[in-house]
Amino acid sequence: MATIADVADYTGLSRATVSRVINDYPHVSKDKRQLVHEAMKELGYFPNTSARNLRNRRTNLVAVLIPRLTNPFFTLILDGIEKVAEENGFQLIICQTKSSKKKELEFLNLLQTKQVDGVIFTSIENDWEQIQPYTAHGPIILCNEYHHDATVPMVRLNQVQGSYLGTKHLIERGHQRLAYCMGSTSGLSNDRRKGFFQAVDEAGLEVKSEWIFHDTYTMEDGVKTFNQILTLTERPTAIFTGGDEVAAAMVKEAKRNGLDVPGDMAILGFDDQPIASMIEPELTTIYQPGAEIGSRAMTIFIDCLKGKRERVRQSVMELPLSLVIRKST
């Protein structure tokens, strides 16, 4: 079995230099790092990660909090996080909160008790005041979801832009009676609502209170909401949904009730999940680069853990969204 001394002899470097490379210390040239890693691979040398982690008080585990495992958008985020994690020797603990404040705090205890090195949030259930104390125990990164009072790094998508583009598209298609489906009162949801009403106000349109629907997340919510719309005396002619799952369920329910999409009712999705191009008619939707925000969030997390970046928020990384026009509008 190869030792650190064998790696040093093979490379012609000192044991101290080899050790600094293995432990990812700074001030070692890129060439020397590459030389050491190639030698380790050639000799079959595997560092004692348990001992190293004990010295560094690290677990190389990251808790990723998501609301629902069944939502494909969060699967994309996880793919992006996992790719960078694997490349850097980290493993993920997937924590499904099911939108429960209690479960979210229970998972945060993993950080407080040093069972994980840090936490990446893809959604937030509690107020930031309840989460903030946990930042003393390790890096916390907000990915996708965000809170305007948060003091940690954030990677988010431009929700105002995305919902504005989608709403403007519906208006340009000639729709004046628009229904709006929203989630919680989080920063993400509030910004999405802001973009919707920005486009509505620019067009001089009125949105009646009975055309606004809250807490719509799942396909079941989509069916329920669509049937509520059918009971209205004055129905909207277009629906802005908060996700492709909701939109797909509405398309199916519309067809079940003998309505044509988009002839009788235009339906706009959000996320550009695989289901958007599988359903008939295919969904017009807003594309969100889930894998990209996941990979960027994990990169920032690693930089925070290694001291290359402050754990407090210095800037917000915001990525753009885009409109994908298909046949449901």
Image (cartoon, rainbow, N blue to C red):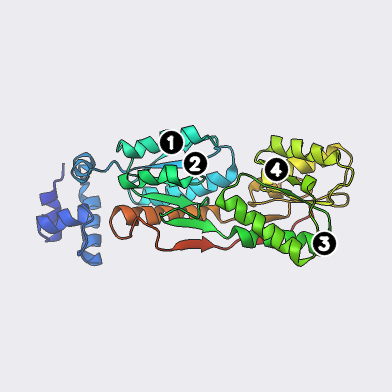
Q: Amino acid at mark 4?
A: Val
Disc assigned to residue 173:
3
In this figure, which residue is indicated by the disc labeled 4? Answer: 246
Indicate left or right for 110 with 258 as reference: left
In this figure, which residue is indicated by the disc labeled 2? Answer: 126
Between circles 1 and 3, the one closer to the viewer is: 1
Q: Secondary structure at mark 2?
A: loop
Mark 3 surroundings: few (<14), some (14-19) or many (≥20) residues within 10 A: few
Q: Amino acid at mark 1?
A: Leu
Who comes first in sequence, dot 2 or dot 1? 1
Who comes first in sequence, dot 1 or dot 3? 1
Who comes first in sequence, dot 4 or dot 2? 2
| Number of numbered discs overlaid on the protein picture | 4
Who comes first in sequence, dot 2 or dot 3? 2
Q: Between residues 259 and 209, which one lies in front from this camera angle?
A: 209
Q: Position of residue 55 (x, y in %)?
A: 18, 44
Q: Amino acid at mark 2?
A: Asn
Residue 13 shows in this picture: yes
Q: Between residues 58 and 154, which one lies in front from this camera angle?
A: 154
Looking at the image, is 272 positioned above or below residue 216?
Answer: below
Q: CA distance from mark 2 to mark 3?
A: 39 Å
Q: Quadrant of residue 251?
A: top right
In this figure, which residue is indicated by the disc labeled 1? Answer: 105
Between circles 1 and 4, the one closer to the viewer is: 1
Mark 1 surroundings: few (<14), some (14-19) or many (≥20) residues within 10 A: some
Q: Position of residue 84 (x, y in %)?
A: 40, 52
Q: Residue at x 46, y 56 (%)?
A: 154
